[in-house]
Image: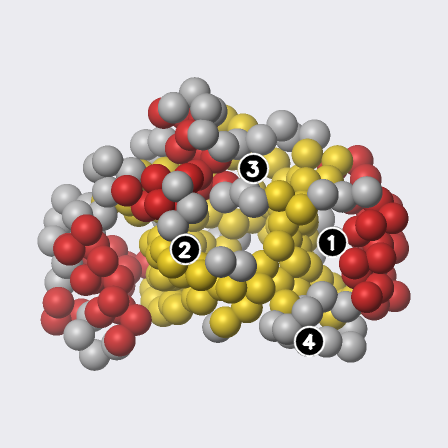
Amino acid sequence: MNRYEVKYLVATRDVPGLLQDLAPYTRPDPYSPEWGYSISSVYWDTPEFALFWEKIEGVKYRRKLRFRRYGDSPEIFVEVKGREDRTLHKRRVRWPLEQVRAAYGDGEVRVDWNLVRDDPVATEVALMIERLRLEPRMAIRYRRRALFGQFDPELRITFDGRILYHPSDFSLDRPFEEGRSVIDPRVSVLEIKYDHRAPIWLTKAICERGLQMVRMSKYCTAVDKHYFGGLNT
């Protein structure tokens, strides 16, 4: 997956109106109920938060590792998400929870190479964990509403709200229920992912709402807020 990704902050109370503006040009994600679905992610980093600091320092090419669960699905997406400027590169495997746990452990148990060697992405994840000494460092949960472009199926628009974090509860079989807010809950994150360029109708809707593009990472915002007093994001 090679894509562009841009983000905006929008008042949560304005999301229904914006959804109405976009309705003629979009269709709901068939897996997304009216009020969205939950996403639970566990981000891995070094003991010194090296991947966090790469983002803060603006390293042009960087990667991050996350384990992600959608709703109560029995499967986990193990994802390597890379970025070069504004271009997003994502590689992932989709495995049952028990297989993920057996292959990668919890940061203290070593990687089981017999379970990952036949898949190139799974092997890349294992190499990252062992060479960089990665371990689970932050859990993030939120609710997402998702849309696809009506005329451009590669266009994806999402609204993420009630974004919470937990610095120590990394369970994906029972994701944390109570956490701390990553950003003000009165604000949601609008993400737009596209292959070539955003359509004119979408840029017009954003301009009419006066939305300003932001460079924001949920993971980095949570780490900065919890460990560094929010001084870096």
Q: Residue at (50%, 41%) from the top-left corner?
A: 218
Question: Mark 4 — residue?
Answer: 153
Position of residue 31 relative to residue 167, above or below, is below
Per the rendering, the mark at residue 34 is 1
Position of residue 79 relative to residue 227, above or below, is below
Determine which quarter of the picture holds residue 158.
bottom right
Q: Is residue 73 visible?
A: no
In the rendered image, residue 179, in percent from the top left (x then y), is placed at 47, 29
Which mark sits nearer the N-terminus, 1 or 4? Answer: 1
Which mark sits nearer the N-terminus, 1 or 3? Answer: 1
State which mark lies toward you, 1 or 3: 3
The one of 204 and 177 positioned closer to us in this rendering: 204
Q: Residue at (82%, 50%) from the top-left corner?
A: 207
Q: Amino acid at mark 1?
A: Glu
In the rendered image, residue 120, in percent from the top left (x then y), is placed at 26, 76
Question: Mark 3 — residue?
Answer: 163
| Element on which disc 4 rests | loop
The one of 207 and 177 positioned closer to us in this rendering: 207
| Element on which disc 1 rests | loop
State which mark lies toward you, 1 or 4: 4
For disc 2, the neighbor class at 10 Å (few under 14, some 14 to 19, many from 20) is: few
Which mark sits nearer the N-terminus, 2 or 4? Answer: 2
Question: Mark 2 — residue?
Answer: 60
For disc 3, the neighbor class at 10 Å (few under 14, some 14 to 19, many from 20) is: many
Q: Residue at (77%, 68%) from the top-left corner?
A: 199
Residue at mark 1 to residue at mark 4: CA–CA distance: 20 Å
Q: Residue furthest top?
A: 229
Which mark sits nearer the N-terminus, 3 or 4? Answer: 4
Q: Are marks 2 and 3 in contact (CB under 8 Å)?
A: no
Which mark sits nearer the N-terminus, 2 or 3? Answer: 2
